[in-house]
Amino acid sequence: TQNPIYQVGVFPLPESQLDRFLMRLRLGYPNPTAERDLLAGRDRREVLADLQAVLNPEELVQQQHRVREVRTSPALLDYLQAIIAASRQNPAFAEGLSPRGGLGLKQAAQAWAHLDGRDYAQPEALQAVLPGIVSPRLRPAPGTSPGEEGWAARILLQLPIP
């Protein structure tokens, strides 16, 4: 989501608004087989009308509660705090992760663990969700170049796992 300015085109959101989104995902282009199916298939609005719900609203709320119950050990919270501190202290970043960004990282790791069938989060869950969480939040400091997508996560993944 980006803000239109004067209803002509779209422009990037300011940082204060970006921080309100949990993560940024880039889907890229479909592989050739999937794209062929898309081109040869029915109109997307027809396909959308035929989709069946996977969860009803009550089941969705239940799943959200289960995610909040996923345990985070003190060692995992140490690792999370080390990531947050590193983002704030690294001169490559204009600003580090906000408290909201840290909470988002923790909650996304809990959701990852839940989807993986675990009732506890591991460092690997933090690492799995880190790129999507930090990419909209961490900007390069003036005079530095971000390089390719995922540069911030690569820097933060260099931290030792407690």
Image (spheres, rainbow, N blue to C red):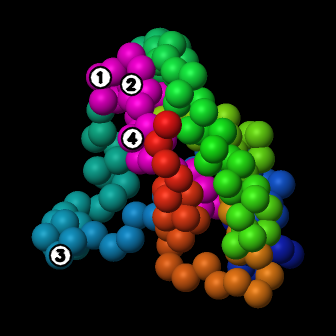
Q: Nearer the viewer, residue 30 or 123?
A: 123
Q: Which residue is mark 4?
A: 124
Which residue in the structure is indicated by mark 3?
32
Q: Is residue 92 left or right of residue 24?
A: right
Q: Which residues are magenta?
A: 110-136
Residue sitting nearer the eye, 43 or 99:
99
Q: Earlier in the sequence, mark 3 or mark 1?
A: 3
Distance from Cα at disc 4 to Cα at disc 3:
31 Å
Q: Amino acid at mark 3?
A: Pro
- Does the rendering let one see residue 57? no
At label 4, the amino acid type is Glu
User: Is 127 included in the stretch rendered in magenta?
Assistant: yes
Are circles 3 and 1 on residues that touch, CB within 8 Å?
no
Mark 4: give few (<14), some (14-19) or many (20+) Cα within 10 Å: some
Q: Nearer the viewer, mark 3 or mark 1?
A: 1
Whole-angstrom CA distance, mark 4 to mark 1, is 14 Å
Q: Give the residue type that dot 1 points to.
A: Gly
Residue 30 placement: quadrant: bottom left
Query: Which is nearer the eye, 56 or 107?
Result: 107
Residue labelled with disc 2: 114
Compared with 62, 156 (above or below) is below
Question: Where residue 25 is drawn, which disc sits there?
Answer: none
**Residue 9 appears at what percent x and percent y?**
71, 79
Q: Position of residue 29 (x, y in %)?
A: 33, 73
Q: Are marks 2 and 1 in contact (CB under 8 Å)?
A: yes
Residue at x 52% of width, y 30% of height: 76
Instruction: Classify residue 3 as left or right of residue 107.
Output: right
Residue at image mark 1: 117
User: Residue at the spot x=61%, y=48% of the render?
Assistant: 83
Residue 83 visible in the displayed image: yes
Tell me which numbered mark, 2 or 4, is placed earlier along the sequence: 2
